[in-house]
Every structure is written in C-alpha cells, then in structure tokens.
Amino acid sequence: MKPARRLSVATAAALAGALVLVLTGCGSSGSGSDDDSAGAGLSVGSAYMPQPVSDSMAAGFLVITNKGAAGDVLTRVTSSVAGEVTVHKTVGQTMEEAERLDIPAHGELVLRSGGDHLMFEQLKRKPREGEKISVQLHFAKTSPITVEMPVKSATYNPKTGH
C-alpha cells in the first residue's frame, strides 16, 4: 500500500486555480449513464468529466448507489485515457489521495466538485466536450463496473445537486 499523498493548502489552491473551471459543480440532471445491471446492488449514475483545462489532468464525478444490505468499498479506478486515476478525499481545505472509499449498505458514495472526486492524471490525450470516456470502477466485493463518462463543457454545472 503506497502512502497517501497530501497536498498543502497552497498546493491545493494552486491546483484549484488551474482547475477552477473544471471543478464547478455537481448534480444528477442528465449527467451520465446509469448502470443498473451491476451486481450486489451497486449502480452508478450522474457520471461526468468537465472538459479539462489542463493537458495533463482532469476531474471526474459520479454517484455510486448501493441498494444492497452489505456495504462495499471502491478500491481502484482505471481508464485508458489516463496513466493513473486516483480517488481524492477533501478534508477541510486539503485534498488527499485515498486508497479506498466506503459505499455504505442502502447508501451512496458521492464524488462531486468540492468534495471527494476522481483525478485523471498523466492524460494520454485531452478529452473533448461531447466525447465519452470509459472508466472502470473496481470494488472489494462487487465485480468491476464500466461507466461511460460523458465529457461536458469546462463550465458545466448540473441543475440539481447531490
């Protein structure tokens, strides 16, 4: 297990400045494909990636809903568009990489702007608005789920919040 990377407030602020247009909002209004066929009661919706302003990194947001009686854990995320996809937790004013995020039984894991989110690092190419990016979510108990994440405008701000 690699140690969690922590960003200082200044570094996080610099990243936020570079991604200010990217990290503008969250929501569920027509913002992604839902996968209700996932095993163990997991489904994914409200997925989207704002068009990156950077050539090397992008953010991603989605909601994993667990209708099952047992919790699960998001352990890893992969995508062919990035060298690495990391999950970040926002703690106070600090963003830090998380090894795993819990998905409670009969609950949700919400990855949203200003909170926990995905970071696509070492982009192999810059996704453009209108494309769909394939993302694989890996869990402790459930088989991987592939999500087609639409790329929205850099200023996209869903109408309904999480």
Image (cartoon, helix red, strand yellow):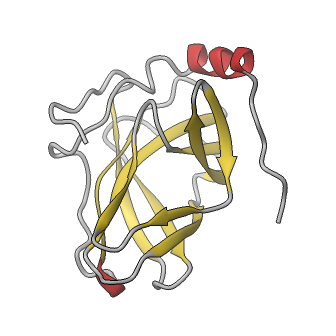
Q: Which of the image's four quarters has the N terminus?
A: bottom right
Give the total number of marks visible in the rendering: 0
Residue 157: quarter of image: top left
Residue 103 position in % (x across, y down): 43, 66
* Relative vertical location of residue 127 with respect to residue 87 in this rendering, above or below: above
For residue 41, side relative to residue 72 (left or right): left
Q: Is residue 139 visible?
A: yes
| Residue occupying image coordinates x 73% and y 20% | 11
| Residue occupying image coordinates x 39% and y 68% | 104
| Residue 18 vs residue 116, the one in the foreground | 116
Residue 151 position in % (x across, y down): 36, 41
Residue 58 position in % (x across, y down): 55, 36
Residue 129: quarter of image: top left
* Relative vertical location of residue 147 with respect to residue 42 in this rendering, above or below: above
| Residue occupying image coordinates x 54% and y 73% | 138
Q: Which of the image's four quarters has the C terminus?
A: top left
**Most extreme residue toward the right, as rendered?**
2
Q: Is residue 83 visible?
A: no
| Residue occupying image coordinates x 54% and y 22% | 19
Residue 77 position in % (x across, y down): 57, 62
* Relative vertical location of residue 78 with respect to residue 125 in this rendering, above or below: below
| Residue 52 vs residue 25, the one in the foreground | 25
| Residue 58 vs residue 89, the one in the foreground | 89
For residue 78, side relative to residue 97 (left or right): left
